[in-house]
Image (cartoon, helix red, strand yellow):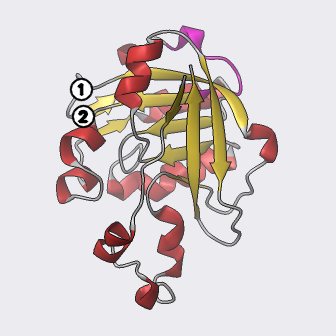
Amino acid sequence: MKLDLSLQVDKKLLETLGLAVQSIERDLDKAGHVGTHFDVMDKEFSIEKIITKGRVFDISGLTTGEVKISDVNLSSVQPDDFVMFYSGTLKRWGYGTKEYLSANIELSDELIDELIAKNVSFIGVDMGGVKKPQDHRRIDQYCADKGIFIIENLNNLDLLYEKTKDESFTVYTFPVNMTGFSGLPCRIIAEV
């Protein structure tokens, strides 16, 4: 079974976000940060990472504060894994809403450092970022400098968790072939 973890973007959404054709020149860099995307920052995506193993963790019981190492069991995480966190934020608030963008949950620096130490390929969330807005760029750049990309706005993580629980699965990550952007829209498919 294959699950599309990408958020579908339609013209109305682009217009709502101010990224319609008439404003694309003015806001060109934002184009890489619409829908499911990863923050590549100033790095390059290697096609060697298109196919990875994945794991999803349910953190939906936490609605405020930081997700700490003690909140998840990372013992099954392997090098090059795509590690995803299902918070329920996208399902609860809807993509792009004020509530969605100001979600009160974030991954702790210690948890991110542990994932870096495990040499994962990607950290994915169903939120606008792994950190609150004031630390968003800092942590995206920090991870990119370590060769790990943050993928934001993942969809259907609830269905994926329901199907896989503690089992690994195959993930296909297909970014749009763009250059010079800090974000790359991508299509993410999980095979369970």
Q: Quadrant of the N terminus?
A: top right
Query: What residue is at 39 percent from the left and 64 percent from the top?
Result: 10
Classify residue 46 as left or right of residue 87.
right
Task: Give the residue pinned by disc 1.
Answer: 62
State which region is magenta: 74-82
The residue tagged with tag 2: helix, strand or loop? strand
Q: CA distance from mark 1 to mark 2?
A: 8 Å
Label drawn at residue 121: none
Q: Amino acid under label 1?
A: Leu
Location of residue 53 with respect to 163 vertically, above or below: below
Q: Position of residue 112 (x, y in %)?
A: 51, 33
What numbered label is drawn on residue 65?
Answer: 2
The image quadrant of residue 87 is top left
- 88 vs 96: above or below: above
Q: Secondary structure at mark 1?
A: loop
Identified at 70% across, 28% down, the residue is 80
In the displayed structure image, the side of residue 44 where residue 112 appears, left or right: left
Task: Look at the image and say whether residue 78 sits in the magenta stretch.
Answer: yes
Quarter of the image where the C terminus is located: top right
Residue 134 locus on image (x, y percent): 35, 57
Q: Dot 1, crowdedness within 10 Å: few (<14), some or many (≥20)?
A: some
Q: Is residue 181 visible?
A: yes
The amino acid sitting under disc 2 is Gly
Q: Are marks 1 and 2 in contact (CB under 8 Å)?
A: yes
Work out whether 68 lies above or below 64. Answer: above
The x, y position of residue 108, in whole percent, is 40, 33
In this view of the protein, which residue sits in the foreground, 176 or 27? 176
Depth order, front residue of 145/178: 178
State the residue at coordinates (54%, 36%).
123
Query: Which is more toward the observer, 36 or 122?
Result: 36
